[in-house]
Image (cartoon, rainbow, N blue to C red):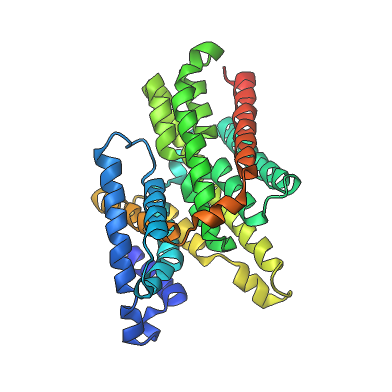
Amino acid sequence: MVVIGLLAIVFINMNLQILKKPIDRSLSILPGLFLLGAIAFFSLQVHDRTAIHFLNPLLIAVLLGIVVGNTIRVPKIYQPGIQFSMKKILRLSVILLGLKLSFTEVLEIGASNLILVAFSSISTFFLTCWLGKVLKINRNLTQLIAAGTSICGASAIVATNSVIDSSEEDITYAIALITGLGTMAMVSYPLIPTLLQLSPQAFGVWCGASIHEVAQVVAAAFQNGTVSGELATVTKLSRVLLLIPVIFMLSWTNKKTQKPGGFSQVFDAIPWFVLIFGLLTIVNTFKLIPTQLQTSILNWNQFLLCIAMAAMGLKTSFHDLNKIGIKPLYLAILSWLFLALTSLIYIKTFMA
């Protein structure tokens, strides 16, 4: 509890700075937060209680936000809360994702599988960035798709946006593409192990190494048995840890293109929220937080993520989405196919 309290104080002092603002300005965020909270709550209910529970609640929140934002003119009184959610709540929710991860679990999958995860994910990220240039897709959208495909779907897109500051349309488009392709993988992968003669262990590693979302990995892998499911989950968590170096790299390269050199550039390029994310991962590794409290925090964090995504949706315009075009779809498909085939070839060579 002491560690969590200290981390919260550090985050507030470095990022939120609410206490330094006039009280009336702080209260101005409340209408927007109430609106977004309602959308987030409804999204989670739709996910938990309807037949579309296989969809990520973040995607549901984005889509609901888009519908509301494009059918109703949102009054100005809601804008401070929407902007606050897109920046501050977003980063806080990324930090708390660290409580999902444990270095101990990652090491359990073995050196060979860690090499697979690192090689396939990193090569997919850089290939996607290169293909984005070839297809003349804007840099920010390309990086969102690259992170979402190679690391952990919508969560990686959210975290990446925290350091590259993409448009709402780019974020919405990227989440829709990555979630859609991940759903296709979730449905199609269980049909493959017999066809390709993959052992339960090999199939589990393949799911964890190449399917986009954690929930999609679990849904696909456990259909082939407990061994596949458990190994897939741990393999996927090892991919999620790659978020830390990728966010550092993106933060540095994007700051570098915007500012002159010097110590201030180095300091500004450090994504402090990712450092706190890493600290929480260490805290979770040593089991310093009671399980019940950890579960409660992660449940609330899902709500915070939905709030941030609903804010993105409210600021997204159908007209602006249409201007992006279809090329990003080609990029996302090629990126996923490369990741799936690269990891499958490795597994067939060394595991199957």
Quadrant where the C terminus sits is top right
Q: Which quarter of the picture shows residue 307?
A: bottom left
Q: Where is residue 103 in the image (x, y as percent from the top left)?
A: 47, 45
Quick check: 195 above or below 88? above
Q: Which quarter of the picture shows residue 47?
A: top left
What residue is at 34 percent from the left and 50 percent from the top?
287
What residue is at 30 percent from the left and 64 percent from the top?
35
Q: Which quarter of the picture shows residue 351?
A: top right
User: Viewed as shown, does residue 87 lie left or right of 170?
Assistant: left
What residue is at 32 percent from the left and 85 percent from the top?
24
Q: Position of residue 67 (x, y in %)?
A: 39, 53
Does the rendering let one see residue 245? no
User: Viewed as shown, does residue 319 lie left or right of 269?
Assistant: left
Does the rendering let one see residue 164? yes
What residue is at 56 percent from the left and 51 percent from the top?
322
User: Viewed as shown, does residue 326 lie left or right of 204?
Assistant: right
- Counting the numbered discs, the total is 0
Q: Where is residue 241 in the image (x, y as percent from the top left)?
A: 51, 47
Quadrant where the N terminus sits is bottom left
Quick check: 210 above or below 304? above
Q: Which residue lies furthest to the bottom in this view?
A: 22
Q: Position of residue 77 (x, y in %)?
A: 35, 75
Q: Residue furthest right?
A: 134
Q: Which of 10 and 30 is in front in this view?
A: 30
Q: Nearer the viewer, residue 172 or 14?
A: 172
